[in-house]
Image (cartoon, rainbow, N blue to C red):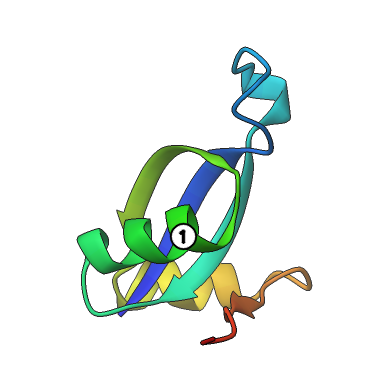
């Protein structure tokens, strides 16, 4: 499943809507997606959205669409 994760780049700065960014992640569940982001970044996660087929097709039309992969250590 592909998830869209909305986040703030830093936990040290108060969240502002203007600073919200997003990434796409392939994970088995929302819990797994949250765990991957928390273990591999210092992002402040705002919201995680599971993309259905139509939403994913729409997002894939963007030239900025890229599924983020974290290296397993």
Q: Position of residue 69 (x, y in %)?
A: 58, 81
Residue 39 lies, with reference to residue 59, above or below; the image says: above
Residue displayed at 68% across by 38% down: 9
Residue displayed at 76% across by 68% down: 64
Q: Position of residue 29 (x, y in %)?
A: 21, 70
Q: Position of residue 72 (x, y in %)?
A: 51, 87
Residue named by callout 1: 39
Label 1 secondary element? helix
Q: For residue 23, which quarter of the picture?
A: bottom right
Q: For residue 62, which quarter of the picture?
A: bottom right
Task: Decide which of 12, 73 is in the foreground and name it.
Answer: 73
Residue at the outermost top position: 14
Q: Position of residue 4 (x, y in %)?
A: 45, 59
Side of 48 where 57 appears, left or right: right
Side of 34 where 56 appears, left or right: right
Q: Quadrant of the N terminus?
A: bottom left
Residue at the outermost bottom position: 72
Badge 1, how many Cα within 10 Å: few under 14, some, many 20+? Answer: few
Residue displayed at 62% across by 21% down: 17
Q: For residue 59, which quarter of the picture?
A: bottom right
Residue at the outermost right position: 63
Residue displayed at 60% across by 75% down: 68
Residue at the outermost front position: 73
Residue 21 lies, with reference to residue 30, above or below; the image says: above
Q: How many marks?
A: 1
Q: Quadrant of the C terminus?
A: bottom right
């Amino acid at each position: 499943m592909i998830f869209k994760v909305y986040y703030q780049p830093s936990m040290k700065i108060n969240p502002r809507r203007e600073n919200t960014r997003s990434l796409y992640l392939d994970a088995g569940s929302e819990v797994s997606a949250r765990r991957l982001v928390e273990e591999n970044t210092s992002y402040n996660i705002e919201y995680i959205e599971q993309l259905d087929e139509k939403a994913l097709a729409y997002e894939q039309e963007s030239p900025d669409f890229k599924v983020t992969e974290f290296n397993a250590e």
